[in-house]
Image (spheres, coloured by chain):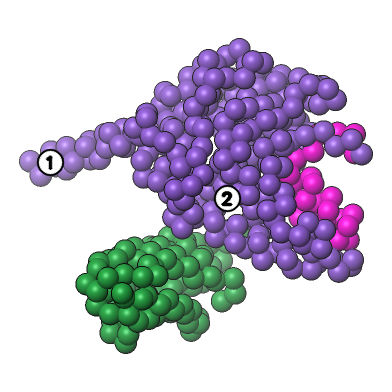
Amino acid sequence: MDNVRPRVRTPRSASAGDVATIKTLISHPMESGQRKDSQGNTIPRQIINRFTCDFNGENVIDVTMEPAISTNPYFEFEVKIPESGDFQFTWYDDDGSVYEETKSVEVS
Amino acid sequence: MKFNTMTAAAALALVTPAMLAANPDAKLVVNGQIEMTTETEAPEHLDGLRTIRSGWTFRTEETQSLQMDDFDNPAMIYVDEARDAWYAKDGAADQSCASCHEDPESLEGLRAELPKWNEEAGKVYTAEMYVNECRTERMEAEPWGWDSQEMKNMTALISSVSRGMTVDVQIDGPVRETWERGKEIYYTRYGQLELACATCHEENYDMNIRADHLSQGHINGFPTYRLKQANLVSMHNRFNGCIRDTRGVPYEIGSEDFVALELYVASRGNGLSVEGPAVRN
C-alpha cells in the first residue's frame, strides 16, 4: 500500500539495563471491512494485522491486530536494553506489504 | 440485582469525562520547546469577552497531552505528507513549492497574520487561496479543493512552522469591510435552533452542550486534528458543521461569507499563539 509511513522514537543511547519507552506510529487507514461506500458496496477490509519489535534478533513484542483498531495505529511500550544493538520494527499489511524500520541504540 | 450493578457502572462511566477535565493552570509547551499563550487579555475590538482562552484549555488532559509532543500529535503525519508534496514538482510549469519558497520554514510567521489583504487581488486572502494561486498561476497545476486532503495537509504544514507566534490579524484598512461582514455573521442567529456563533462561544463557553465542553471557538489551532474525524479539519469545515448543527443551511466552504467569518473569528484570537495543527476532540 502506498503512502504508509512508519515512525518510531527510541533512545539513541542508554546505560546497560535501562528501561526505555518506545513509541511507534504508522500511517494507515485501517479499513475495517464493515463500512460501505456511497453506492452501498462493502469497502474491503485492509488493515495491518501484525506488529512486531525485535532487539538484536530477540523478540520484544508481537501484536496481533484486529479490525477495530483505529486509523494510524500507535503503540507505546517499555523495553529493557541489555547491550548496544538494533531495534527492528515490522508491520504486516493484509495486502502482503511489509513495512520496516530499524533504530540503533548505543549502550555506554 | 445484576441489572442494578450494570446501571451503576454505566452511570459511573458517564460521570468520568467530567472528572478528567483539565487542570486550569496547565501550560502548553510543545516538544518541550515551543511555549504557547493559552490565556490572555481579549483584543480591544472584542467587547463580549474579558479574557480569551485557547481551545486547548477546554480539553481533557489526555487530549491536551497529544498536542504537546509532535510524535504523539496525529496531525504531524499529514504535515510530513505535505512536506513531501512541497518538494514534488506538479503542473505544466514543472515547479514545486520549493522552486520559489525553498523550505517550508521560509513561510514562518505567515499563519499568524492570516487571513490578510491581498493588494493585487483586491480582497482578503486565506492560506487556501494563496496555495491555490501558487498552484494555478505559477505551477500551472490543477487547484486543490478547499477541503481536500492535500490542501489541509499543506495548510497544516504552513501553520506548523509558525507555531508559538502570536496571532496578529489586521482588522483595519482595506479589510475592514470584510471584517464587519464576518462580525455580522458571528452575531446572526441561524437555523431552526436560532443559534449564533456567539450564543455558544461567547455567552456560554465553558458550559456543556450535551456532552461537549464549549470552547470560545478560536481558530488559532486550525487546521486541527479532530479525534472524532481521525483527520485534519479546516476552519470552513468546522464553520459549516456549526451552522449545520443549528439546523440551518450553511454557506459554501470557501465562500466569501466564510472567508469574512474566518477573518473575524481569527481576529478574536489576536494575542493567542498559533497552535495549528492542534489536537481537539
Q: In the rendered image, which quarter is residue B264 located in?
A: top right
Residue A82 in the image: above or below residue B28: below
The label on residue A52 is: none
Residue at numbered disc 1: B5
B36 with respect to B141 (left or right): left
Front residue of this view, candidates A54 and B185 = A54
Instruction: State the residue at coordinates (27%, 33%).
Output: B19
Instruction: State the residue at coordinates (29%, 66%).
Output: A20
Precedes in sequence: disc 1 or disc 2: 1
Image position, residue A18 (x, y; %): 24, 68
Stretch in magenta:
B121-145
Instruction: State the residue at coordinates (30%, 37%).
Output: B20
The C terminus of chain B lies in quadrant:
top left
Rendered purple, the chain in question is: B
A59 with respect to B55 (left or right): left
Front residue of this view, candidates B262 and A8 = A8
Residue B227 visible: no
Residue B118 visible: yes
Q: Is B276 within the magenta?
A: no
Residue at numbered disc 2: B232
Distance in Å between CA atoms under marks 1 and 2: 40 Å
The amino acid pointed to by label 2 is Leu
The amino acid pointed to by label 1 is Thr
Q: Residue furthest bottom?
A: A57
